[in-house]
Amino acid sequence: MKTLCLAGLGVLTLQAQQPAQTFTLPNGLRVVHLEDHERPLVRVLLHQDLQPGDTPAGHGGLAALALRLLDRSDAGDLKATDYVRLLDGAGIQVDRTLRPGALEWRLVARSRDQDRALGLLADRVLRTVLDPQLLEFQRLACWQEELRLQASPRATLRQALTPDPGLRPTLQGLAAISLEDLLAFKAKVFRPERAVLVLHGDLGLEQAKRLVMLSLGSWTAPRFVAPDPHPLPAPAAETMPLAVASREPGRPAQTLAQALIQPPAGLAPEVAALLGLLVPGDPAALPVQVGMEDSCLVAALDAGPGESAPALWSRLTAHLEALRQRGFTQADLDRAKAAWPARLSLESLDPERQMTTALDQALGRGVAPDQLQAVSLEALNTGLRRWLDPAGYRGGVTGAPEPRPSDQQPPRNQP
């Protein structure tokens, strides 16, 4: 009986998870459709590509400020208060995220409200009229949010290691942003050819095409004119490690070293996926805690009693270098290959993960199961040595005591 139940569950999962279907609108918007009639819900993920050059030098926080104004300005014919009221009345949930490489909106609505939900999202993203009267208030609110984040040394350090410095709000950057800068940013970034839309849920392919065409088919980006044909040079990158003072008065500083390691250019997605399973939690890295965030390896290590910042950073890099030199065995590789299908099975039960996987495929960074199984041990360890190359670390130490004169200074790795 138990076997029959498990078999039945597998059939239901396969029925619910249909292959992704893709199409492109005449305006260049790429759409990925995942059909699932198990629940009367529709989920939407709108991914807007964000590149480092989208933020002019000296305008740190431009993207964050633009998102705040988009959320709070009038959209189309709707006042901002009416927009919120319509969302709440229909039980439509909209979340937006700013992260390295993307602006993203995620929407969840009942299938009967799908037309209204996607229409409201289109109004918010495409037809918002930025209100100049809100600019000063939101500029201040954006900086206050940054100050709240800086109350945590760990969060401050993690943000300081963000690969794109333009995403980090600074007091000088926020003060320099004008309404013209925000309009130019919106015209440059919010373009259909730079976006991917993922639909998941209780709607068929033809229904999805009609829905997207009605709401986003008229999306045309205005002609972008750069405000300055000769932008100011970007500020010099900070040397690493970066010392950040604790923002918690009256409490002892927590000394923490952290390294953010982006995957090297040209690393195959299949190799990156296997390393993402093997590196976090590997005993060779202990006591360093290693995890994955936005496709990057993030390593963190707490200081011992009286340990200085240079000594702590050296200890963190020494553990990572030990893992890099040791490499993985064939048994490790076989274990990771066996774990990958199980991970996909779990993702099939999570619609949000399904959408993220479909987005990765559309952006050309998806994992091909047959190529993953063909990865050799040599390719895996070559990828490990490239990824854990110390020259690629962005690292820092926060909450550290002043180094003693006898302490050796840490290496200066370029980000």
Image (cartoon, helix red, strand yellow):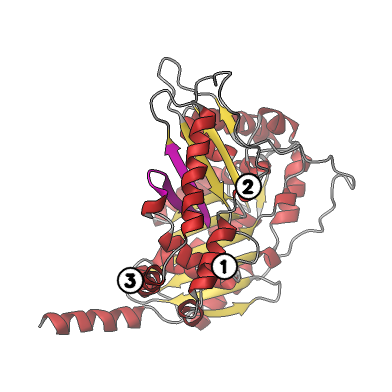
Residue type of the residue flagged with mark 1: Leu
| Location of residue 48 in the rendering, given as x and y in whole percent from the top left corner | 62, 59
User: Magenta segment, principal secondary structure?
Assistant: strand
User: Of the residues tagged 1 and 3, which is closer to the observer?
Assistant: 1
Snapshot quadrant of residue 16: bottom left
Looking at the rendered image, the disc whose residue lies closer to the viewer, 2 or 1, is 2
Distance CA(mark 1)–CA(mark 3): 20 Å
**Inter-mark Cα distance, 2 to 1:** 25 Å
Give whichever of 234, 86 is nearer the camera.
234
Label whose residue precedes the other's in the sequence (2 or 1): 2
**Cβ atoms at labels 2 and 1 below 8 Å apart:** no
Q: Tell me the residue that label 3 is attached to.
A: 39
Q: Is residue 40 visible?
A: no
In magenta stretch: residue 108:
no
Q: Residue at x 54, y 74 (%)?
A: 32
Q: Please name the amino acid that badge 2 sits on.
A: Pro
